[in-house]
Image: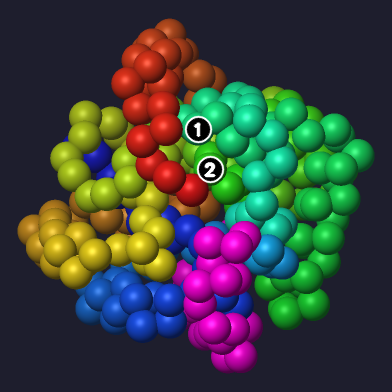
């Protein structure tokens, strides 16, 4: 049986407040505690130029934390600097992959500092567009206490190069033949139909969503040949399919 995790991307001072509230209400209805990716210093014109600044944003992040939601570091500015795919080439653009190590360290250091200033100690990282490289891992080790990545393709959680990797395989809820599945949602751009489909899927599959902290599912399992085959097939079929 699969176990499901909900992940929400692109929380920041510039977001669609109504859609995020709808997602929060939906998850609260089923007592699901997601991983939420916060952009510390959002400069992405697709959001900053579209949504008014939410003056209550950091209060909301505190509310999520108090409810048991896991707050993750989701990049720094969410602005793409390269056309690289790195270790997880789902897309050919990145804020991190292909960026010099010192610049990546600056981003991680600054992002962590902002979250800490608001009382948040991030334990998970995932990059905009899902793309990062070996230098990103070095930067995380040297500039933070983060040792968990939500991304890459695998059948289950695995441990490699000093990091736990929680696989992230789909941009919407659906049945998949993996032991651990993370569904990645972007509430800012969700349609009414997608909200309804998500609600129905959770309602009919509630028992498969993780009940406890994600930490209870961390494993020191090594990546195996099955995982490597899944990665290769997935990247060939799904590159550029998710958006940011």
Dot 1 corresponds to which residue?
A: 91
The spot of residue 188 in percent (x, y) is 40, 67
The N terminus: image quadrant: top left
Dot 2 corresponds to which residue?
A: 129
Please state which of residues 59 and 217 is positioned toward the viewer in this rendering. Answer: 59
Magenta segment: does it hold 49?
yes
Horizontal side, residue 106 vs residue 164: left or right: right
Q: Residue at x 91, y 39 (%)?
A: 102
Horizontal side, residue 32 vs residue 207: left or right: right
Dividing the picture into quadrants, the one containing residue 148 is: top right
Q: Residue at x 32, y 41 (%)?
A: 170
Dividing the picture into quadrants, the one containing residue 163 is: top right
The spot of residue 138 in percent (x, y) is 80, 34
State the separation of the CA atoms marked 1 and 2: 6 Å
**Residue numbers of the magenta segment:** 44-72
Please state which of residues 136 and 50 is positioned toward the viewer in this rendering. Answer: 50
The answer to whether residue 162 is above or below residue 79 is: above
Q: Which mark is residue 16?
A: none
Marks 2 and 1: in contact by CB < 8 Å? yes
Q: Residue at x 69, y 72 (%)?
A: 120
């Amino acid at each position: 049986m699969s176990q499901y995790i909900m992940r929400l991307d692109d929380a920041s001072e510039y977001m669609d407040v109504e859609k995020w509230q709808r997602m929060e209400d939906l998850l609260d209805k089923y007592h699901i505690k997601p991983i939420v990716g916060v952009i510390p210093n959002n400069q992405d014109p697709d959001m900053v130029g579209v949504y008014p600044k939410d003056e209550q944003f950091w209060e909301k992040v505190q509310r999520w934390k108090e409810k048991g939601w896991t707050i993750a570091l989701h990049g720094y500015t969410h602005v793409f600097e390269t056309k690289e795919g790195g270790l997880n080439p789902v897309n050919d653009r990145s804020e991190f992959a292909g960026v010099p190590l010192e610049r990546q360290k600056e981003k991680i250091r600054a992002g962590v500092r902002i979250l800490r200033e608001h009382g948040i100690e991030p334990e998970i990282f995932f990059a905009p567009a899902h793309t990062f490289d070996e230098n990103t891992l070095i930067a995380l080790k040297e500039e933070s206490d983060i040792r968990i990545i939500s991304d890459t393709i695998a059948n289950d959680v695995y441990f490699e190069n000093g990091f736990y990797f929680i696989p992230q395989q789909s941009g919407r809820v659906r049945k998949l033949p993996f032991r651990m599945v993370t569904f990645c949602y972007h509430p800012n751009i969700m349609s009414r139909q997608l909200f309804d489909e998500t609600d129905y899927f959770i309602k009919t599959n509630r028992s498969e969503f993780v009940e406890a902290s994600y930490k209870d599912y961390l494993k020191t399992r090594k990546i195996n040949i099955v995982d490597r085959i899944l990665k290769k097939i997935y990247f060939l079929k799904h590159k550029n399919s998710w958006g940011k």
